[in-house]
């Protein structure tokens, strides 16, 4: 792919990862690149990413992970943007808008008591058991689809000049998408933890079921807050990165939150969390 091609965010990430050594490709922190692609939109042209967009992602990641845990993950996003700039996929060095924050020594001392009782699994992103089951089913289906596409590639390649072979190119693109999705799911299953029960808690986290009331209309809605990969808005499963999800995340029963929508500002009161 040439530097003048209108490459998508997902395509540039794949090129970046392929440029790394085998050792660096196995870094757990590369998972943050998947989150970055979901934030910007995996099919969005890389050159259309804006500085404010990067800055907002930077602040969101710090809020989500905490200052201490965000530095290594955001470093991977910074490296990606440096790569995109050097290779000509973006015209501005957006990496300067990824500002890594290091915890102050005093803050580490104050929080050390809490950190000691946390296991390493607490630093993982989390999916519900249902979400993990769905990913496993999708992974099995995708792997079953590989052989038919492989056979189609063989048939198309045998039909003549591969330089002007539309069926061959289509089959190759389909295989590329399939393999990329398989890798994506396998990375999620390897790096995501399982959400524990939130019973008897008023604190909204991933896996929380919430009842919200529109302050103006008094209409109530129910949602389950989940990680982006398993969000299904029409089924009431919203991402913690969605407008409502971001507004209620880490909030408690009784709080009123502002949600900015295309229809304007809506205020919700958090009625119940389970």
Image (cartoon, helix red, strand yellow):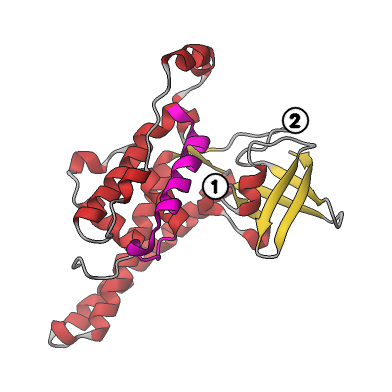
Describe residue 154's horizontal placement relative to residue 116 as left or right: left
Q: What residue did someone put label 2 on?
A: 200
Residue appearing at x 51%, y 21% in the figure: 118
Query: In this view, which residue lies farthest toward the right?
Result: 218
Where does the magenta region start and end?
41-67
List x then y, in percent, for residue 237: 64, 54
Describe residue 1's horizontal placement relative to residue 96 as left or right: left
Disc 1, SS:
loop
Disc 2, SS:
loop
Q: Name above or below for residue 206 compared with residue 170.
A: above
Pick the quarter of the image with the N terminus: bottom left
Q: Residues within 10 Å of mark 2 (few under 14, many from 20)?
A: few
Q: What residue did someone put label 1 on?
A: 227
Residue appearing at x 19%, y 54% in the figure: 86
List x then y, in percent, for residue 264: 70, 61
Residue appearing at x 42%, y 56% in the figure: 139
Q: Name above or below for residue 39 compared with residue 152.
A: above
């Amino acid at each position: 792919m040439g530097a003048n091609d209108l490459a998508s965010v997902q395509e540039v990430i794949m090129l970046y990862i392929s440029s790394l050594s085998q050792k660096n490709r196995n870094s757990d922190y590369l998972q943050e690149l998947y989150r970055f692609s979901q934030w910007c939109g995996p099919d969005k042209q890389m050159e259309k990413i804006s500085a404010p967009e990067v800055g907002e992602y930077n602040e969101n990641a710090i809020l989500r992970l905490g200052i201490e845990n965000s530095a290594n993950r955001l470093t991977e996003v910074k490296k990606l943007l440096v790569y995109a700039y050097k290779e000509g996929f973006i015209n501005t060095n957006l990496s300067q808008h990824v500002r890594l924050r290091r915890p102050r020594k005093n803050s580490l001392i104050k929080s050390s008591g809490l950190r000691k009782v946390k296991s390493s699994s607490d630093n993982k992103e989390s999916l519900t058991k249902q979400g993990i089951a769905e990913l496993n089913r999708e992974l099995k289906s995708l792997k079953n689809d590989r052989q038919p596409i492989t056979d189609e590639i063989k048939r198309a390649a045998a039909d003549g000049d591969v330089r002007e072979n539309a069926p061959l190119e289509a089959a190759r693109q389909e295989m590329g998408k399939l393999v990329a999705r398989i890798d994506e799911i396998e990375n999620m299953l390897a790096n995501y933890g399982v959400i524990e029960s939130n019973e008897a808690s008023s604190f909204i986290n991933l896996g929380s079921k919430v009842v919200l009331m529109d302050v103006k209309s008094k209409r109530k809605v129910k949602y389950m807050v989940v990680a982006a990969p398993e969000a299904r808005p029409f089924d009431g499963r919203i991402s913690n990165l969605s407008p409502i999800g971001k507004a209620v995340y880490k909030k408690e029963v009784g709080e009123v939150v502002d949600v900015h929508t295309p229809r304007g500002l809506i205020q919700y009161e958090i009625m119940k969390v389970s």
